[in-house]
Amino acid sequence: MNKLSIRTITFKYVSALGLLAILALSSYFILQENIQSQEKSAAIINVSGRQRMLSQRIALKAHQLLSAQDSIRQNKLRSELVHAIDLMSTSHNSLINGNAEIGLPGNPSKTVKSMLFSSLLSLDSKVKDYLKYANKIVESSNADVLTRNKDVHYLSEKSNQILIGLDSLVKQYQLESELSIAWLQRLELLIAVSFLGVLLMLALFVFRPMTSRIKEEANELKKAEEYSRTIMELSADGIIIINSEGIIVSYNQAAAIMFGYNESQVRGSRINMLVPEADCYDHNKFLSDYQNKCAASSQCPEREIEGLRQDDTTIPLAMSVSEISHESKQLFICSLRDMTERKKMEDQLKKTAITDVLTGLLNRRGFFTLSEKHCKLAQRNKQLMLLIYVDLDGMKIINDKYGHKEGDRAIIDTANILKSSFRESDIIARIGGDEFVVLLTENSDEDIEHIVTKSVMGNLKQHNTIDENRYALSLSLGIAHFDPCHSSSLEVILTEADKSMYENKKKRKVGRN
């Protein structure tokens, strides 16, 4: 999902939430207004009922005062009448001017004002006249019976008119309250419809696109994971994914072929199960160093390791490690390449570099590489060794008379004679065209020179008795000793053996090729 889409959906979502909040607040205020309207109507009905009661009480008390004979009774009735007059006066003022304490409105409608003050009903003037005459009765003396009788009859007549006016006023307040409540109910219905409309808009223009986009992204992510898994499975390299604790999380088919385990057998196990026990410490140290050093720069040099197969055999591998973050977890991808063929090739190249192609013996480089190691070992162990220099006589004559192919055969035959004459522990090499050397690494016999000469010459004589051979081979030998007590180099000893061989040729009157 691109940034523009996210911003657009976010704007729509926030706008819709803001509108919903406004509608919710409006609904709350409408509810409060409805409650206040109900309370106001109830307060008006309550006060009107009190006015009805007080007007009747005033008329009753005035009539009782008129008929009272003793002064104590008159004073008591006068006091009750005064109290009723005060209550009615206060209630009337509350109806006219409002009273917040008891919930009466202070701004009556035009119709209510007309009922209170117009000449048709003029409830205000009737109540005031009613109270005026009631006060006259209170203020009159007990002796003024005729005046009081007249005022009492007036109160009785006016009381009915006030009751009728109060009933009309209550009906009007009830009507206005019902109209106000009906309007508020319509407004509340409109808000509810708007609320549902906003929810519908949220569903259509926010949640639906968002859900659709989430599904698309989930499908894309699933396809990407399947694609990555396919690439991982098709990779010729073994791929093992581990967590920061070295636990195997994933493992591809190439790795299964390398190690002989399927994925279910290794998942959840430590990667150490795929490493020889002797290499576990170095491997764990490498992973630890990678997490601390290489992971920061995302650079990790490839290293060669030994892998441990299910059958306990080892396999040479080249491993490279890279780090990824998945679902806030640190994972490491170990890419493994089978080095078996490469190792074989390297071994072959090494062997070729130190082996004589024609005879299969060591060449000059191979002879010096291996012999120098044995010389150092012999010096440490104070061990004597014998170096024999062998030269094939008449090589030029064989090449000139029988051809170079036959000359190669003569060299091969000489190599085979030497192989059959010496032990496997002895080092045999071809160091020149027709020159060979042998280093006897174990020289324990005092008459070793005679034994060696007899062995070589015996095998040579046996070879020359073969009827198929078109010519007889002749070898010249020279012998030199390696003494660990003297620090002579291998080159010096080889030179001494060469001189001894040349002296042997001179005695036998055989020319050097």
Image (cartoon, grey):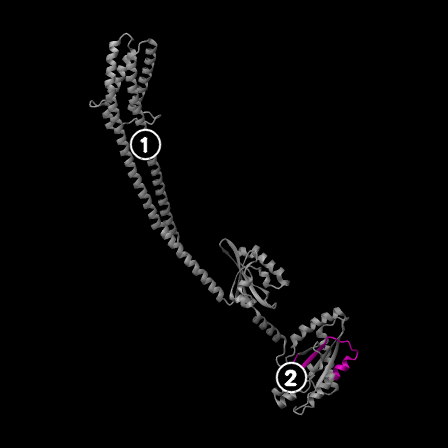
Disc 1 designates what residue? 38
Q: Residue at x 31, y 17 (%)?
A: 85
On residue 412, the disc is: 2
Q: Is residue 273 above or below residue 136?
A: below
- From which residue to which does the magenta span run? 431-454
Q: Is residue 309 above or below residue 494?
A: above
Disc marking residue 70: none
Taking 446 as reference, is 426 left or right? left
Is residue 433 in view? yes
Point 68% across, 73% down: residue = 370
Residue depicted at 60% across the width and 59% down the height:
284
Nearer the observer, 224 or 348? 224
The foreground one among 233 and 172 is: 172
Q: Is disc 1 surrounded by few (<14), some (14 to 19) or many (20+) residues within 10 Å?
A: some
* Whether residue 505 can be seen here: no
Residue 494, percent across and down? 71, 76
Q: What quarter of the picture does the C terminus occupy?
A: bottom right
Residue 434 is covered by the magenta coloring: yes
Residue nearest the viewer, comparing 502 with 154: 154
- The image quarter containing residue 501 is bottom right
Residue type highlighted by circle 1: Gln
Q: Position of residue 248 (x, y in %)?
A: 55, 60
* Precedes in sequence: disc 2 or disc 1: 1
